[in-house]
Image: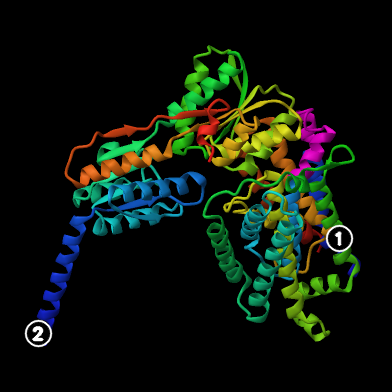
Amino acid sequence: MKRMVALFLTLCLILMSGVVLAQTETPVFTFCISHMTNAFTVTAAEAMTAAAEAAGAKMTVVEAAQDINKQVSQIEMAVNTSDVIIIEPVSTDGVLAAVSAAMEAGVPVVIFNQAISDPSRASTFCGVSNADLGYMQMKRAIEDMGGSGSVALLLGPLGSDGQLGRSAGYKRAIDETNGAVTIAFEETANWTTEEALVLAENWLQTGIEIDAFVCQNDGMAMGAVKATEDKNLKIKCYGLDATDDALRAVKEGRLELSVSQNTEAQAQASVDSAMKLWAGEEVPSEILAEGLIIDASNVDEFLK
Amino acid sequence: MKKNAVHLSSLREFVMLIILLIMVGILSLLSPAFARLNNFINIFKQTAINGILAVGMGCVILTGGFDLSVGSIVGLSGVVAALLAQGNTPIIIPILSAIGIGGVAGLLNGTLVSYLGIPAFVVTLGTQNFIRGLAYIISGGRPVFGVSRAYEQIAGMNIFGQVPLLVVYYLVIVAAFAFILQKTVYGRHIYLVGGNAEAARVSGINVKDVKLSVYMIAGLLAGIAGMLLTSRTVSGSPITGSGYELDAIAAVVIGGFSLSGGVGKWYGMLIGALVLSVLSNGLDILGVASYYQYLIKGIIMVGAVYIDVRGRARMQ
């Protein structure tokens, strides 16, 4: 009996070492994504998988359905199965402990798209500056208005990283006008078209002058477009994310522009960093992709 | 005795009608933009989706049941409608598909609750997840765009100058159910099953079939709501409709329905849904942040039921 147990344990050891050896041949990455229910996250997961495949790595994607508890469990699991973990955090604070635990266990961590509140705990951050995206978008809206006027803002869920950053960018651009541009309305539509549509309808109802709808994502921008078209008003609407639908609307002249956060570039940077970390090389603590403005002049290049 | 019972059941609708009128009055005083005719059309437009769901939810609640899956049905039928409403496809195909999905989902809920005897809360919580999952799978997690112009017109077209068809559908559905609940034998059966299922069974009503049928009604109406929402927003998103079941429940509870069944009038469903949308429309126009809107909605809902409970106690 004892010999059987010993034999069994030895076999297990051999098998496990085989697994460990196999792991060191092709890098295994896990991408922990917050959810897979909108265009951005689905594109991110696809771009990540494609970039890993091109680099000769194996990429597993797990999604947490916006549940921080679930994401922490997934990170803990990935520590045992992966060489590098790439995380798009559900919560900028909630993942901190799990990130530290992974790093202490010797598994490097790349944070993707949304910075965590203490970036020094991870190996690197690959993303885009939401403040820069918001600034680019608002700057163009202000230029189009001729430098003065009033804007209505449709925001993401209040307190989310995207909302806070993009709103900070808006504030910077608006402050630069020294009061020439004012905010007529500002409210969250939680990234959704339906909520944006209702808000825009109600705002237009007030008769207060609105020169532009500046929206923190394309879904909400399309809601604003619908509300203005229903009322036969010509108010310029600005989107962000460069979804296919928004780009078609840009092409048709219904939406003024959309700002691309260059998801593919962010995913590529994440996989490049993961490959370097796996090989034991140094990576910078932050790699930011450039935002791109897509308007009527260049929309054809991006329209699939 | 009988007369008294009628008074009791209509008290909350009456109180809520007064509250609705007071709200409209105050909001009109605070903002001239609120009191314009086209804003009232707006309010009906913004009530339509929740209002249609509330009609279905009202029927289920009248039998003492509960349907937590209608929000997911809105999501699934909306996504399927958007996928089928591309290009030159005749719009009847997405319309019938969306309504059909609602019907099948309702049949599933009804069968599980009525014939297998699983509690409605559990069944519809289960189907809520199941149907939401299907919506994600079918859409690949992305919103579906490219809905044709013809399909957009289903909800978007105006008649009589500025009345959107969306509002017409809603009012037609309310009128149809007012007739069914008030004037038909079937309508009386719905009330009887919810009021006293045992007595209904003894008097020869097929309680199981009545219960099954109200889930089908809720499903069909949710399918219609999903189809209309896709037309209104010119897109179908798999997350659409999350939480709509709770708004629908809130509307019928504010409208005087008892969650234990048997009590509630058709106009209660209309008033309850209007209270909710007048509130958010008015507060948006006044520029009140949505956080405070949640507070006010919560207070109104509990307050409405409290006034009702106290009123009943006094009358007895």
Across and down, in percent, residue B90 comes to 75, 54
Residue B117 visible in the snapshot:
yes
In the image: residue A172, left or right of residue B138 = left
**Which quadrant, please, contains the C terminus of chain B?**
bottom right
In the image: residue B267, left or right of residue A224 = right
**Which quadrant, please, contains the N terminus of chain B?**
bottom right
- Discs 2, 1 touching: Cβ within 8 Å: no
Across and down, in percent, residue B168 comes to 84, 49
Residue at 37 percent across and 49 percent down: it is A50
The chain that hosts pointer 2 is: A
Residue that extends furthest to the left in the rendered view of this protein: A3
The chain that hosts pointer 1 is: B
Seen from the viewer's position, the closer of residues A17 and A199 is A17
Decide whether the magenta segment is chiefly helix, strand or loop. helix
- In space, the residues marked 2 and 1 are separated at their CA atoms by 78 Å
In the image: residue A203, left or right of residue A140 = right
Name which quarter of the figure residue A268 lies in: top left
Q: Which residue is mark 2?
A: A2
Name which quarter of the figure residue B254 lies in: bottom right
Query: Magenta span has B40?
Result: yes
Q: Name the element at disc 2.
A: helix
Q: Name the element at disc 1.
A: helix
Across and down, in percent, residue A201 comes to 71, 35
Amino acid type of the residue tagged 2 in the rendering = Lys
Query: Magenta span has A166?
Result: no
Q: Which residue is mark 1?
A: B176
Across and down, in percent, residue A68 comes to 40, 51
Q: Which residues are magenta?
A: B24-46
> On screen, B249 above or below A246?
below
Amino acid type of the residue tagged 1 in the rendering = Ala
Counting every numbered tag in the picture gives 2
Seen from the viewer's position, the closer of residues A236 and B304 is A236
